[in-house]
Structure formats: C-alpha cells, structure tokens
Image (tube, coloured by chain):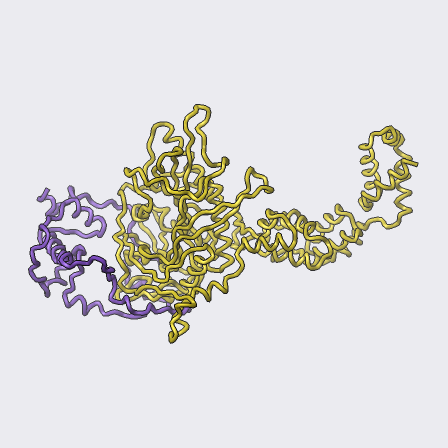
Chain colours: A yellow, B purple
C-alpha cells in the first residue's frame, strides 16, 4: 500500500482526464477569440513581447491567465459536518452526504462563507449580496454524486484586483507594482482523491477530501510570463494566510493553480489557449508557464497550430505534455442546485432587524475586522523603520521551500523578530535589518529552521548588537560571536566575547605600541606610504589586526597609523 | 442533516423535464402518463448525434425504440413550457427561493463511520473504495447492437 500511497494523483494526474477538462471560459478552438480585451497591464520588455529574433518577424505577446483553487481553512466541510484534515486514515472523515448516499442534503457552513467574503474584500471585489449555487455534472470515481456543487451563474464576488510586485532585471533595488484583475470568486466543493494502480487496472478512492470548501479565484489574462504568475500567486498566498481564510500551502494541496497560456502577434486577436495543470509549486508554475509560452511560439513559428487542450506539467522533464484526452469538449450540463436557496449577504444598511445573529452574515462587520494586508504591513515597516521596500518584502514574504517538509516558512515571524530586536537595541533599524536579512536568515535557511526554532533569540541578538553599537567589539568579532551563539550553548554574547577574547582593545597605549611596532617592522611599506601610495596603509592596518587578533578597531588603527606616519 | 423522502416524489411519477431516461426509469414512470401535449412547435426527432452525445454524457443506454420514444415524449412534455410568455420574468429555479438559506456553525459533527460506508461497496482494499480505472473508452455506438444502429 505504501507504493500506492506515493501515486497520489489528486484527481487529474491520472488517466481519465476528459472528465477533468474545464468548461472553457475562453472561447474554444475554431472561434478566433474575442476582441482584444482591454488589458489592465502591459508587460514590460522583460518577458513581455517576445521578439522572434533576427529574422525580423513580428514579436509574440504571451498571455497568461490563472485559475486558482484555495482550500478554505475551516473545521468542517462546506456542506457537511465532517472534519477537514490533511492526512487522516482513508474514508474516516466522510459523512453520508459526502459519500452522496441517497436521502442526504447539503447544509452550508457559515465559516466558509465568511472566508470567501473576507477574501473578496481583501481583493477589492464587488460582493454579490445574492449568489446562487449550481450543479456541475461529470463522471469520475472521486465525485460520488456525479456532480459538484459550485457557483456558476452568480458567484459570491466579482470584479476585483490583486496587486503584486516584481523585481526588474534581477536587481532587488528596482521593484515595480503590477495588477491582475480578478474576474470572480466562487464557493465550491472539493472532490475526493484517486490513487491509480495501473498495474492492476484499478483506482482507489479516498473521500476524506470530498466536500471540503474551496474558493475558486478566476483571474483575467493580464499576465505575460512565468515570473508575473509566480509573483501574483506568492502575494495571493500571503494575503490568504494573513486573512486566515486559507493556509494556501501548495505542497499540501491547499492551493492549486492552473495556468491558461496563449500567444498572439500585436494587433491580432488572442491565440488558441492551452490549459496547464499539475503544477505543484510556485517555482514550477513559473517554469511551466515559460515553457508553454516557448513551446507555442516554436510550434507556431514552424507553421504548426496550437490545440485547445489540457496539458500536464512534468516537473522532472521541465516541460508540458498533453493529457490523454481524446474525448473532446466536456459538457457539464450546469443546472441550479435545487436543494439550496439563494445565499443572501447583508451589510449595515440592509441588516434585518429581527433575525438571529447566527443566521446573518454582515459584510461591513467583516470588513471592519479585516487584519492589515501584507501591502499595508510593508508600508508601515518602511515608514516606521526607514528600511527599504525590498527589505520589507523579504521580511514578509511567505516562502515555500521545495525541500522543506514542514508547512512553516523560514520567514514566518521574521518581521516580528526584527521589530523585537529593534525595540531592545540602540542600533538603528537600518543597520539591524542587515543582520536580520543577511546573517540570521542565511543561518535559518542553511539549517532549514523556522524563525521560531532559531537558537538565537531576538533578545540575544539585540544584546550582541548593543555590544557592537557601544564599540566594545568589532563587526568581524560580532559575526564570530553570532556563529558561536548559533550553536545554542546558552551563553550570552558577553560571555562568548570574553571566552574567545574578542573584546576590542580599549587600552590606547597598548594599541599605539603595536602600531609603532608594525611601522618599525615594515620599512618598505612606510616609505611607499610616505611617497604617496596610500593604499599600502591597508596592509599595515591588516598587520595590526593580525597582531591584535582582530581585537582592534580598524578606524582607530588607521587614525593612529596616519598620525604616526605624519610625524 | 435533513432527510428528504425522495420515495414519495418518485411514486408520484414525477417526470423531470428534459432529463434523459435512466436505465430503470420504466418502473418509475409506469404510474403516470403525461396528458397528450397540444401541438406546439414542429415535433423534431432527436438526432442520432444528440443521442450519442447524451449517452456519453449521462452514461445511459437508450437501448431500444421504446427508450428513445420515452425521451421524445419527455421532451414534448417539457416543450409545453414554451407556450407561456416569459418576457421580463426572472426564471425561478427553486421553490425555496424565498426561504432563508440555513447557515451551520463550523463544528465537526459527522464522520468516523468508515466501516459503515465501506459496507456499501462491492470491492474495497484497506479502507479505500475500489473503482475501475478512468480511461475505459465508451464503446462506440457503431459497435453496439442497439436500436440506434437501425436508424442510421
């Protein structure tokens, strides 16, 4: 069974893929699609219009749109009272409704609605005060009812936007803000999980995930390359995590992204799109999108055509492959869900007077209680501490380490750590940030630790930085102390300094003597300096450092040497 | 969890408008024959392509002329709806439209009935349901010995 457990297909990596092909929201093949829609964003030169090289042919404009499914963070499922939990014994979190036994009915979970409303507000959407539920029919082993309850006609929210930032030209110093429009957000059920056993031609079905609440976010095709897609999804992850509406960990299937990719020449209608599935991380998302763009350009450049098909991303080969789907277009036969009345949401104005509070969802009430979104947090950090915008990004960004098994990010809590250190030290925040982002973070990454697991607490680091600020140690010595503190032996910075004799020499006389000794011993260098070659002075400083075993303040040493040499 | 007694509806011989007949629907519909429909728009025969499409989508098998006839009659019955002028009227898709959608608290109240659920399955392996693999291609209608063959 262990071997089978590794063949997790999450419903679409397996064989029967025709059932999984989405109803094309974009026009299908044959109809050269719609008028060139107004794109909210025009890609910049990098990754934007891809020129066809020296042949002088017209450039290609790639168009990327994402469909994202985020698993709602709730105790129980969308329409039933079974628990939501990752990795539980198969079919143990399944109610009669989830197994679609006859005689059962859906009962909507309030928390799921609130999560969707929060997300919609954070993404500047217009909330539909009346939204409807529909059935989407298709046959697949992990969909016991033969249909999925979703919101196709009137979803809970429409017309929002997501702002994200990109570094241009690999320089962290140049960040640009882009926006992607959100077409709609809808509530829908998740399906169960299929494990395919190809050797024995059978499929094992686990319904634990069947019925879990999902928010589907459909983005307009405003992006143009893998990097933009990746940046947008990262920001979305951060927002969802901040709201708490979804934990959005891709590795655990809590965030699933499908990419729609097409290319066209400027001034012409959009090209035929392909849908890319089976993308398991943000890194792979960027790769998959970029590969597919290149594949389409090559294909069209060779005189071929692009099929309106679904392709899977093969992470090992780094390419997209067609999914075995010869059955043609899928017809989902949407119909209204007859067992659920419309979902009505209220705001402060429309709130009914005599209704049970528990039965009422007030959009304004939720709006007031939204936490600070990442973009707001970043602005506050920059304003309050005078750090650079790109630093604020690193402090807040939710990073998914490919190799890290834990769902915690190494940078989770980094902003809090930074603020805590700043409070406890006299060192300016602009200098502290360097220690956090360069030294602390690299240690954490090297050892795959989270901020909370750091052997160096904010208190210890602040203590160390104070010693540095008070000029009791040099910065080189400070780095050595940090390396010692990292061992987690429980010593304070001061103890470590004393133990390894890293204090700066405070005795001026002793320092002068050493400087003199060095000058006396380096006649040639002294002559060179006096002749005008100032650079040789650094060599003398270095020698003094060596003699003092790094315990001299280089600035002071330079002053002393210069003074002596000018005598 | 509310339980709806579907049985009562079925025994009344409710014919869902436009829905394709299921394999065993003959039993359900025997108790109730629809009134002879008034002659509305021209009675179109359901084409073979549409029948094939329906068979693929809904995994039904019309099997013989009686099955296809029944489908034809069901469509005729539903076509009566066209007689009503619905200009400017919002479609009603649920008789529950004026009811309040009940919101449940986010508590875990169900689950943990693996054994009971698996009892229903014909085949299980270590607490998983076993299903055939997904890519069995549907037998093409040409290869089937069905009524539809004769109509081609």
Up-down relation of residue A151 to residue A559 (above or below): below
Whether residue A295 is visible to the viewer of this picture, yes or no, is yes
Position of the C terminus of chain A by quadrant: top right
Please tell me how many numbered marks the rendered image carries. Answer: 0
Horizontal side of A382 relative to A552 (left or right) equals left
- The residue at the far top in this view is A55
**Residue B133 at x, y percent in the picture:** 30, 49
Q: Nearer the viewer, residue A207 or A328?
A: A328
Q: Residue visible at 39% across and 66% down?
A: A346
Q: Nearer the viewer, residue A389 or A78?
A: A389
Whether residue A258 is visible to the viewer of this picture, yes or no, is no
Question: In the figure, residue B34 lies in which quadrant?
Answer: bottom left
Q: Nearer the viewer, residue A419 or A165?
A: A165
**Residue A445 at x, y percent in the picture:** 60, 48
Question: In the figure, residue A464 lies in which quadrant?
Answer: bottom right
Up-down relation of residue A287 to residue B44 (above or below): above
Horizontal side of A418 relative to A237 (left or right) equals right
Horizontal side of A14 relative to A419 (left or right) equals left
- The residue at the far bottom in this view is A354
**Residue A36 at x, y percent in the picture:** 36, 39
**Residue A499 at x, y percent in the picture:** 79, 53
Q: Residue visible at 59% across and 42% down?
A: A172
């Amino acid at each position: 069974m262990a071997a089978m457990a590794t063949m997790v297909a999450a419903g679409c990596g397996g064989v029967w893929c025709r059932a999984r092909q989405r109803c094309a929201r974009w026009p299908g093949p044959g109809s050269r699609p719609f008028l060139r829609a107004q794109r909210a964003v025009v890609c910049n030169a990098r990754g934007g219009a891809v020129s066809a090289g020296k042949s002088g042919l017209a450039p290609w404009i790639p168009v990327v749109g994402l469909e994202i499914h985020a698993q709602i963070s709730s105790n129980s499922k969308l329409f039933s009272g079974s628990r939501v939990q990752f990795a539980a014994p198969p079919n143990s979190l399944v109610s009669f409704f989830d197994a679609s036994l006859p005689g059962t009915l859906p009962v909507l979970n309030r928390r799921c609605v609130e999560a969707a409303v929060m997300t919609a507000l954070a993404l500047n959407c217009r909330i539909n005060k009346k939204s409807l539920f529909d059935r989407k029919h298709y046959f697949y082993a992990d969909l016991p009812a033969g249909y999925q309850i979703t919101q196709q006609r009137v979803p809970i929210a429409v017309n929002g936007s997501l702002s994200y930032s990109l570094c241009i030209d690999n320089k962290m110093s140049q960040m640009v803000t882009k926006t992607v429009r959100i077409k709609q957000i809808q509530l829908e059920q998740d399906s169960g999980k299929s494990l395919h056993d190809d050797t024995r031609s059978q499929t094992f079905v686990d319904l634990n995930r069947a019925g879990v609440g999902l928010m589907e976010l459909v983005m307009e095709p405003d992006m143009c390359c893998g990097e933009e897609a990746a940046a947008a999804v990262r920001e979305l992850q951060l927002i969802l995590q901040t709201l708490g509406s979804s934990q959005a960990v891709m590795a655990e299937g809590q965030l699933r992204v499908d990419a729609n990719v097409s290319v066209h020449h400027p001034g012409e209608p959009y090209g035929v799109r392909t849908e890319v599935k089976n993308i398991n991380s943000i890194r792979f998302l960027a790769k998959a999108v970029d590969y597919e763009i290149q594949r389409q350009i090559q294909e069209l450049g060779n005189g071929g055509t692009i099929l309106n098909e679904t392709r899977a991303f093969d992470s090992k080969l780094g390419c997209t492959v067609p999914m075995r789907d010869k059955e043609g277009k899928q017809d989902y036969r949407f119909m209204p869900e007859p067992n659920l009345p419309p979902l009505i949401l209220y705001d402060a104005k429309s709130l009914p007077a005599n209704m049970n509070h528990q039965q009422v969802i007030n959009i304004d009430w939720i709006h007031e209680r939204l936490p600070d979104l990442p973009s707001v947090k970043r602005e506050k950090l920059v304003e309050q501490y005078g750090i650079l915008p790109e630093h604020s990004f690193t402090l807040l960004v939710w990073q998914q380490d490919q190799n890290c098994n834990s769902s915690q990010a190494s940078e989770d809590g980094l902003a809090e750590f930074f603020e805590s250190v700043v409070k406890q030290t006299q060192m300016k925040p602009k200098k502290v940030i360097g220690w956090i982002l360069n030294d602390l973070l690299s240690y954490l990454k090297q050892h795959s630790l989270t901020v909370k697991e750091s052997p160096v607490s904010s208190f210890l680091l602040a203590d160390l930085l104070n010693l540095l600020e008070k000029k009791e140690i040099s910065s080189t010595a400070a780095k050595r102390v940090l390396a010692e503190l990292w061992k987690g032996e429980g010593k304070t910075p001061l103890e470590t300094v004393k133990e390894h004799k890293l204090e700066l020499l405070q005795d001026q006389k002793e320092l002068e003597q050493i400087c003199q000794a060095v000058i006396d011993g380096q006649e040639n260098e002294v002559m060179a300096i006096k002749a005008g070659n100032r650079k040789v002075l650094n060599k003398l400083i270095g020698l003094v450092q060596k003699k003092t075993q790094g315990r001299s303040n280089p600035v002071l040493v330079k002053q002393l040497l210069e003074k002596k040499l000018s005598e | 969890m509310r339980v709806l007694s579907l049985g009562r509806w079925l025994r009344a011989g409710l014919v869902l408008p436009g829905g394709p007949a299921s394999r065993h629907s003959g039993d359900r519909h025997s108790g109730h024959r629809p009134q002879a429909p008034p002659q509305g728009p021209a009675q179109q025969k359901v084409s073979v392509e549409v029948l094939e499409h329906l068979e693929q989508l809904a995994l039904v098998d019309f099997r013989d002329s009686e099955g296809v006839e029944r489908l034809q009659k069901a469509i005729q019955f539903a076509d009566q709806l066209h007689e009503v002028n619905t200009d400017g009227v919002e479609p009603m898709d649920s008789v529950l439209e004026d009811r309040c959608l009940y919101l449940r608290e986010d508590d875990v109240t169900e689950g943990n009935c693996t054994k009971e659920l698996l009892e229903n399955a014909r085949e299980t392996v270590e607490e998983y349901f076993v299903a055939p693999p997904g890519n069995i291609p549907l037998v093409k209608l040409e290869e089937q010995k069905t009524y539809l063959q004769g109509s081609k």
